[in-house]
């Protein structure tokens, strides 16, 4: 087996690592200072636009899309190590390179299922980084871990669809640059096939009846960097029938197509978070003394760092295997591995970040280090794209079926 990255991946990795060192890491503190001066915390600091311009100049843009028409033409296996690098600065790096969720998933949906008109109106400005978007699926009144529970209604009325429902934790919706929502709801709530009841539809932000009510907090954070996680209400929201994505009843299949690559992206970014945590642990360990000797000489600290390194190497290999399978046999053929990384990666990275917080003491829970924010983000990903238990249930059933 050849574990080496190909020449193009290595070249992009080198350019992206240099971009992080020269531009992204130095911009983190500047971005904090600029945000404090803005009229609204949801506005984007000026330096983010500078980073985007530099990334485009260097050709580090839309790396996630496999097609050369819209993206860099990379396979999942080629993009995975780049997503890991972006994960080291999740507040800035994905946005700077136009590889940030939920825009990535929305662009994938539009590229694969959108009409020419939908691509012209929404995909092109998203690809150019001129606007942002949101994906509205999760609801507060039902267990959204089972997507068939979704209650939002999308009702045909002549040449229009009318949407009624309430969503929450809709990522990106607080961003003033968010101009389009992809909304999932039921067009056929009484249909016999529960996986054909749902559809997805495009709703411009300024459509009458769409109300962004409030920002939802995540462990006390409002996540200004990613446009927040909002509660959104749809009251008799009317859009043309041409805004439907794909066909009626195709929403569930579109969601599954969207989530497969998304889980690879999340997991590789999580590994990048873990790598940054290990780096911070090592720097802290060699710079602090307790009970007469450096923390780096304390046995428990050495154990934490060693175990973290072993865990990251294991996770990376599993995620890269999953990316390779997605490229060679498709998402369906990689179903077991996709669910495996979704279970294992967030859980393990949360543990590494928790130990990094512990090693930093009071500093670990403060705003002076990125660890607390990284921990909150990683812990949330044990729920996003389906909670651990849903994937464990599905994975176990698939394993047991082999013996029936």
Image (tube, rainbow, N blue to C red):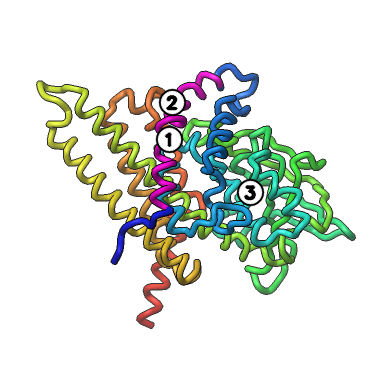
Q: Note whether residue 142 is visible.
A: yes
**Element marked by disc 2:** helix
Question: Do callouts 2 and 3 mark residues in contact (Cβ within 8 Å)?
Answer: no
The earlier-in-sequence mark between 2 and 3 is 2
Residue 69 in the image: state x and y as whole percent. 63, 56
Q: CA distance from mark 3 to mark 1?
A: 28 Å
Residue 222 falls left or right of residue 151: left
Report which residue position mark 2 lands on.
Answer: 26
Looking at marks 3 and 1 on the same chain, the residue that comes earlier in the sequence is marked by: 1
Residue 59: where, in percent of width, then height?
53, 43
Please tell me whether residue 60 is drawn above or below residue 23 in the rendered image.
below
Residue sitting farthest toward the right: 158
Residue underneath mark 3: 135
Q: Nearer the viewer, mark 2 or mark 3?
A: 2
Magenta stretch in the rendered image: 9-34
**Which element type, helix, strand or loop, lies under badge 1?**
helix
Q: Nearer the viewer, residue 121 or 390?
A: 121
| 10 is within the stretch colored magenta | yes
């Amino acid at each position: 087996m050849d574990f080496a990255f190909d020449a193009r991946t290595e070249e992009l990795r080198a350019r992206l690592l240099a971009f992080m060192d020269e531009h992204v890491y130095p911009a983190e503190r500047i971005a904090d200072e600029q945000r404090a001066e803005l009229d609204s915390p949801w506005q984007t600091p000026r330096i983010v636009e500078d980073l985007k311009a530099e990334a485009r100049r260097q050709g580090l843009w839309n790396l996630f899309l496999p097609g050369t028409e819209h993206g860099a033409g990379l396979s999942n296996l080629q993009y995975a190590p780049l997503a890991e690098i972006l994960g080291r600065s999740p507040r800035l790096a994905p946005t700077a390179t136009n590889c940030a969720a939920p825009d990535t998933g929305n662009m994938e949906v539009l590229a694969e299922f959108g009409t020419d008109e939908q691509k012209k109106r929404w995909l092109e400005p998203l690809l150019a980084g001129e606007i942002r978007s949101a994906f509205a699926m999760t609801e507060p009144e039902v267990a959204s871990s089972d997507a068939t529970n979704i209650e939002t209604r999308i009702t045909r009325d002549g040449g229009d669809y009318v949407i009624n429902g309430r969503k929450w934790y809709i990522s990106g919706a607080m961003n003033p640059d968010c101009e389009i929502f992809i909304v999932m709801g039921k067009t056929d709530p009484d249909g016999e096939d529960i996986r054909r009841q749902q559809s997805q539809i495009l709703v411009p932000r300024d459509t009458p009846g769409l109300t962004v009510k409030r920002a939802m907090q995540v462990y006390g954070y409002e996540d200004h960097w990613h446009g927040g996680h909002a509660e959104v209400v749809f009251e008799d929201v009317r859009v043309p029938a041409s805004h439907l994505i794909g066909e009626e009843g195709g929403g569930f299949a579109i969601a599954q197509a969207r989530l497969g690559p998304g889980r690879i992206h999340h997991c590789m970014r999580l590994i990048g978070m873990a790598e940054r945590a290990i780096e911070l642990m090592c720097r802290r360990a060699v710079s602090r003394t307790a009970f007469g000797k450096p923390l780096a000489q304390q046995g428990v600290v050495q154990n934490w760092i060693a175990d973290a390194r072993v865990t990251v190497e294991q996770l990376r290999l599993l995620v890269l295997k999953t990316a390779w399978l997605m490229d060679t046999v498709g998402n369906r053929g990689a179903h077991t591995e996709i669910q495996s990384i979704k279970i294992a990666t967030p859980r393990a990275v949360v543990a590494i970040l928790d130990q990094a917080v512990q090693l930093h003491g009071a500093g670990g829970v403060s705003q002076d280090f990125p660890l607390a924010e990284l921990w909150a983000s990683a812990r949330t990903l044990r729920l996003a794209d389906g909670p651990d238990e849903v994937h464990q249930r599905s994975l176990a059933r698939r394993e047991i079926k082999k013996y029936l």
